[in-house]
Image (spheres, rainbow, N blue to C red):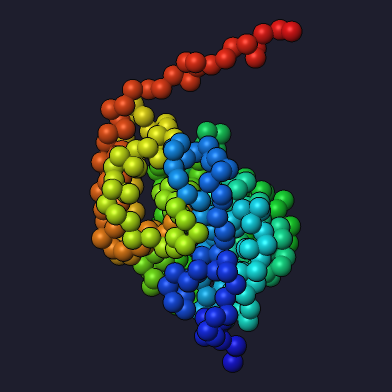
Amino acid sequence: MSPPPPSAMPNAWPDSVTEIVPGALYAVGARLDESRPVPWLPRGGRGDLPMQAYAFRSEDKFVLIDGGLSVHRAALSAGLTALAKGARERLMMITRRDTDTIITMPWMLRDLGIEKIFLGGGDQGPLAFFEVLERAEAEARMYVVSRSVPTGWLTPGSSMRVGPFRLEYARTPIRVLATNWIYEASTKTLFTSDCFAFLRCPSEETPLVARPAPRDISADRLIDFLDVKFDWLRAIDTRAVAKDFDAIFEGREIDRICPAYGRVIEGHDNVALLRANTLEALARMAKLPRRSLIEGFDWSCCEAP
């Protein structure tokens, strides 16, 4: 019989671990000081920005979702090592293959004993006209990172079961590059990668898990975020994007949103409000004028010496 996970022992977690769903789901990471600007967040935000990986743990199963930032290596290592202790099956799933998501993987795979990495298809990059090319590129990149750890491939709509957890990949249309969200049915949790990554912690005492006031997840707040992070949504017909976004929520019970950055948004009613306000934000962004990319640009940098 495998040893119980540390959740069975009181006060056993390192400070970098936050229990999201008791005995099942955990966030592991640290916070980025507000004095360090984040270019894809609206200016004027106050408070530190949480940045985290997520992990499922049940009996001898351990599933890691994304890898967190390398600047938080000590916090990640302490928390994930504690969570993985005693697990006989150790897997990793990633939502996207950007540097800030996979940069910690080489040491994580080695130190945590990850046995398999699961990737997923999504929106195609501009040069990947066929899914087979995207898959080949993804597997080649993972080979460079991991060398000896095999990969699995999950297409949008497919799922896999690990112990009591049923994890589904869903295609997200809001991002241009290949990105997937992951839904876990037993905990009713949706992992949204770098989307909805805008709720900060105003003080050190602010918990990671939030039950935000309606104004904090209003359509105006979402437009402020989307207009910086995904500004290509301006002045396009966003109806297809909104339809595909809404389909992710249709037929799924979702009690919380877990972004890679920012606070966890807790509560079924808050998720429903976030869904409705995102649809409103997408409709309003379609009516915004296109922003000039060269207006105000300092051309002196292009002058010959």
**Residue 14: quarter of image:** bottom right
Q: Quadrant of the C terminus?
A: top right
Residue 158's spot in the image, x, y percent?
43, 60
| Residue found 60% across the figure and 88% down from its top | 3
Residue 221's spot in the image, x, y percent?
34, 42
Viewer-nearest residue: 212 or 86: 212
Q: In the picture provided, is 7 more to the left or to the right than 190?
A: right
| Residue found 71% across the figure and 60% down from its top | 107
Residue 198 drawn above or below residue 264? above
Viewer-nearest residue: 53 or 117: 53
Residue 276 drawn above or below residue 62? above
| Residue found 66% across the figure and 65% down from its top | 77
Question: What is the residue that sits farthest to the bottom in this orientation?
Answer: 1
Residue 305 drawn above or below residue 196? above
Give the number of callouts.
0
Viewer-nearest residue: 46 or 265: 46
Residue 90's spot in the image, x, y percent?
61, 72
| Residue found 65% across the figure and 72% down from its top | 81
Q: In the picture provided, is 75 more to the left or to the right than 277?
A: right
